[in-house]
Amino acid sequence: YAAGFIFMRRMGSAALTATGPVLNVLPFGVRLDAAESLPALAQRLAGQMKKMRRHQRYDAEQIVRDSGRAAGAEPLFGPVLNVKI
């Protein structure tokens, strides 16, 4: 399952002083294990988000092209998550 996760597309002080929002939504793969505790799941997902941050400028449209998918054929992600970390 993949949710969409919103990133600011700006890093460092540029993100703090931006005059307007420039956002990007990336697919965020979520695998659930019934045996995994909630704190362990949260820790695993936080680590995954940290790794994704370096790719926050990678447009979703480019991901579709690079993956060889036909535009609009299948959604890249489901619900979109907007969490401030």
Image: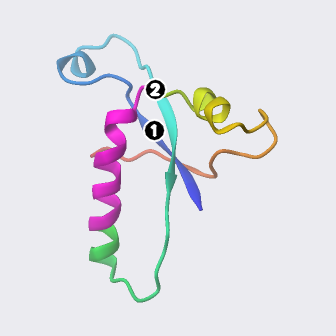
Q: Is residue 46 above or below residue 10?
A: below
Q: Residue at x 28, y 47 (%)?
A: 50
Judged from the image, the secondary structure of the residue bearing numbered disc 1 is strand
Q: Main secondary structure of the magenta part?
A: helix
Q: Inspect the magenta stretch and tell me whether residue 46 lies in it.
A: yes
Query: What x and y, as percent, mark residue 85?
Result: 27, 46
Instruction: Identify the coloring.
Output: rainbow
Q: Which amino acid does label 2 sit on?
A: Leu
Q: Which amino acid does label 1 sit on?
A: Ile
Quadrant of residue 68 in the image?
top right
Magenta region: 43-57
Dots 1, 2 in contact, CB < 8 A:
yes
Q: Name the residue under label 1.
A: 6
Residue drawn at x 66%, y 30% is 65
Point 48% across, 29% down: residue? 24
Q: Looking at the picture, how far across and down is residue 83, in whole percent? A: 38, 47
Q: Which of marks 1 and 2 is nearer the N terminus?
A: 1
Q: Badge 1, how many Cα within 10 Å: few under 14, some, many 20+?
A: some
Identify the disc placed on residue 23: 2
The answer to whether residue 54 is left or right of residue 34 is left
Q: Is residue 62 above or below residue 38?
A: above
In the picture as drawn, the residue positioned furthest to the top comes out as: 19
